[in-house]
Amino acid sequence: MIATGAGYRSLPLDRWSDFEGAGIYYAATELEARTCGPHPVAVVGGANSAGQAALYLAGRGSAVTLVVRGADLGAGMSSYLADRILAHPAITVRTRTEVVALHGRDHLEAITVRGNAEPGAAGTDLRCRGLFCFIGASPATDWLEGVAMDDHGFILTDVEIDDTAPGSPWIELGRRPLPFETSLPRVFATGDVRAGSMKRVAAAVGEGASAIRSVHRSLSEAPV
């Protein structure tokens, strides 16, 4: 059973690790919203998760700056979500922009943003009680070989596996991959490391429990 998880991607900025949990967050829940209170916050990312976080935090009373590296908010975000964000009075969208510096003592207090079309510019300082980073995750699969993965390194399982290709072990076994089974028979993957998973703790726990059923089934079919 492979359950090595994934790590949130971060920005290569000085003092990033100092502010993790003290102004830098990878989720926008009730806990983070209470910590930030009514203070200004920033959300980094251009996909749906970033958009949903921006709307949630704006709804909790924070002035939100959405920092998007690309030129078009709709390029990686659902159109209905992008439209809601652009219409929200508490959300400022900065496209073609990156966070280039962090400021504060024991807690994040401000950030510097700069347009990526003008790398030599001085940048703009923004008050920021919370920086919410939604730029994806990297799976812990650098050590893994011989198992099918997607272009991002997440492990393919069950219905995502081509079990009809010439030389496929599934033809010899006379069955298709079981739920959570990888391209290697009797090797399973669950949680954040699996392609298509929800990337949430509760979902990972549920997947692990469900995968045990497949493990027992594969063991019962194994030759003695």
Image: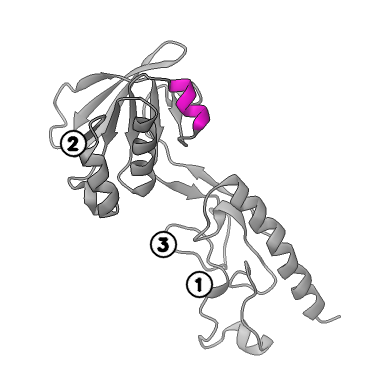
The spot of residue 133 in percent (x, y) is 39, 36
Q: Which residue is mark 3?
A: 151
Q: Is residue 142 left or right of residue 174?
A: left
The spot of residue 201 in percent (x, y) is 60, 45
**Structural distance between the alpha carbons of marks 1 and 3:** 13 Å
Which residue: 53% across, 74% down? 159
The spot of residue 64 in percent (x, y) is 30, 29
Q: Of discs 1 and 3, which sits in the foreground?
A: 1
Q: Which residues are magenta?
A: 30-36
Q: Which residue is mark 2?
A: 116
Which mark identifies residue 193?
none
Which mark identifies residue 160?
1
Magenta stretch contains residue 166: no
**Structural distance between the alpha carbons of marks 2 and 3:** 26 Å
Magenta stretch contains residue 33: yes
* Magenta stretch: dominant secondary structure: helix
Q: Amino acid at mark 3?
A: Asp
Residue 110 visible in the displayed image? yes
SS at badge 1: helix
The spot of residue 62 in percent (x, y) is 35, 25
Q: Earlier in the sequence, mark 2 or mark 3?
A: 2
Q: Amino acid at mark 2?
A: Asn
Would you place residue 87 above or below residue 15 in this image?
below
